[in-house]
Image (cartoon, rainbow, N blue to C red):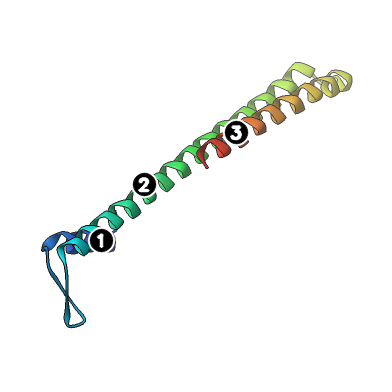
Amino acid sequence: MSGELQRLAAQAGVASIFRTHGGLLQAREGKELQRDLRELARHGVLAKAEVAVHTDVAEEAMDAAAEINSYRRARAGGDETADYALSVIQGNHLRAVSRSQRNVDNDLI
């Protein structure tokens, strides 16, 4: 939680009555503020988790693409016909990986 968010959360929990523009902020309003701050913090944590998941999936997809590319080249052994045939299979693999990555995006949203 950021320093400002911590300050706001602490301020919301300090007392049941707050002074505002010459009036008083009632205990109910303080509780609503606490609830809103908790909800905001919860959304922030979820957003960070989504970023971490997307990053992990992207890194795995890139590693898989690099590995399959190296494997295709080694397997073809310089034979252009074999390289072409294997590149078709590689393309299918990359489309499947992309589809899986999009599914993760859709599941998280």
Q: Which residue is mark 3?
A: 103
Q: Indicate left or right for 100 with 75 as reference.
A: left
In this view, the residue in front, 108 or 96, is 108
Q: Nearer the viewer, residue 71 or 24?
A: 24
The mark lying in front, picked from 2 and 1, is 1
Please give the name of the residue rendered at 12% of the width and 62% of the height, measured from the top-left corner: 14
**Comes first in the chain, label 1 or label 3:** 1
Q: Earlier in the sequence, mark 2 or mark 1?
A: 1
Q: Where does the image place residue 47, in percent across and percent down from the top left? A: 43, 47
Other-residue count near label 2 (Cα within 10 Å), few / some / many at <14 / 14–19 / ≥20: few
Residue 45: numbered disc: 2
What's under tag 2, amino acid-wise?
Val
Secondary structure at numbered mark 2: helix
> 10 Å neighbourhood of mark 1: few (<14), some, or many (≥20)?
some
Name the mark on residue 53.
none
**Nearer to me, 37 or 83:** 37
Q: Quadrant of residue 98?
A: top right
Name above or below for residue 69 compared with residue 77.
Answer: below
Find the distance from the CA under tag 2 to the CA under tag 1: 18 Å
Q: Residues within 10 Å of mark 3 (few under 14, many from 20)?
A: few
Q: Position of residue 52 (x, y in %)?
A: 45, 41
